[in-house]
Amino acid sequence: SVCVAYGDPHHKTFDGTAHDFQGTCRYTLTKDLGTGADFNVEVQEVPLPWLTSASVVREVYLEAYGHRIAIRQQKIEISENGEEIRSLPFSLADGRIQVQLSGLFVHIQTDLGVEVFYDGNHYAKVEVPSNYQNRVGGLCGNFNGNPDDDFTTPDGTVVSDVNSFGRSWLTSVATCPGGIVGPVGEPPSCPDDIRATAESAERCGLLKKPDGPFAACHGTVDPERFFDNCVFDMCARNGDVVGLCEDFETYADACVEAGVHSFFWRDHSLCRK
């Protein structure tokens, strides 16, 4: 199953629950709660520089086989000794951990079947095989097939408040700026004119446009949640289109993962590469 965290940040758990926990510290994204404690994935979330009421994933960590790998924006480190990985592919633990580039992502594969992806910007993804069902915890939920109890804290309590849930998976107060435990709070309400622009067919509305570049995917992956997240992000950025292509890319990635490949969204004038 797949869990993602992207944008300001939007999370989708292994069981499909969407939440927008706006933390500003380091949190457990997912970890093995079994006796072997096979793996642990953490994310460092930081406030957006232009909007203190939203945050973004800036670092991703994987612990497995006694190694700790940190993927940062500009570099990849083996954290237990501070050694920087300067060329990829790279392997650790007698080949049981493989680090490579996969498209825009740094991709860590383990022989546990656990895979971690990070684009060095805002998008983190974890894939966990079915043998870890009902034995993981973190911001990605408990992977038991029931989305209704995804907000489970480390002590096994199910809570309804996303902030209580998110804070419960804080790794250390020392990872919080100024020692202040987030979250940073709800973004301000979105002015009508900015919302209208964000929802237009030239902006986030392109995701839902019936004859748009993503139309071939609509029947496979519902664009509604991605559209809502895109509008949320544009509102959080006060209408700035910075990040718009990242939202498009996130939907495109979900489409490709679902087996839909025949669309050309990068023809959008803002997203040509």
Image (cartoon, helix red, strand yellow):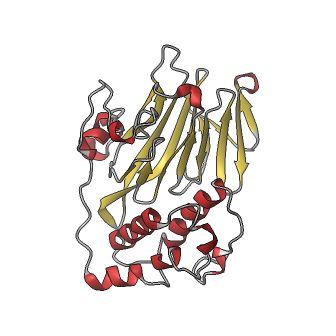
From the top left corner, tell me how far across and down residue 45 is, in percent: 40, 48
Residue at position x 41%, y 78% from top? Answer: 240
State left or right for residue 34 relative to residue 167.
right
Asked where in the image residue 263 lies, by quadrant, the reply is bottom right
- Residue 262 or 60: which is nearer the viewer? 262
- Count of picture labels: 0
Residue at position x 58%, y 66% from top? Answer: 219
Residue at position x 23%, y 55% from top? Answer: 185
- Residue 100 or 174: which is nearer the viewer? 100
- Residue 263 or 249: which is nearer the viewer? 263
Quarter occupied by the N terminus: top right
Q: Residue furthest top?
A: 35
Depicted 211 relative to depicted 169: above or below: below
From the top left corner, tell me how far across and down residue 22 is, in percent: 32, 52
Task: Residue 180: tell me if it is visible.
Answer: no
From the top left corner, tell me how far across and down residue 154 is, in percent: 33, 27
Depicted 57 relative to depicted 248: above or below: above
Task: Residue 57: tell me if it is visible.
Answer: yes
Asked where in the image residue 156 lies, by quadrant, the reply is top left
Depicted 67 relative to depicted 149: above or below: above
State left or right for residue 128 relative to residue 48.
right
- Residue 93 or 253: which is nearer the viewer? 253
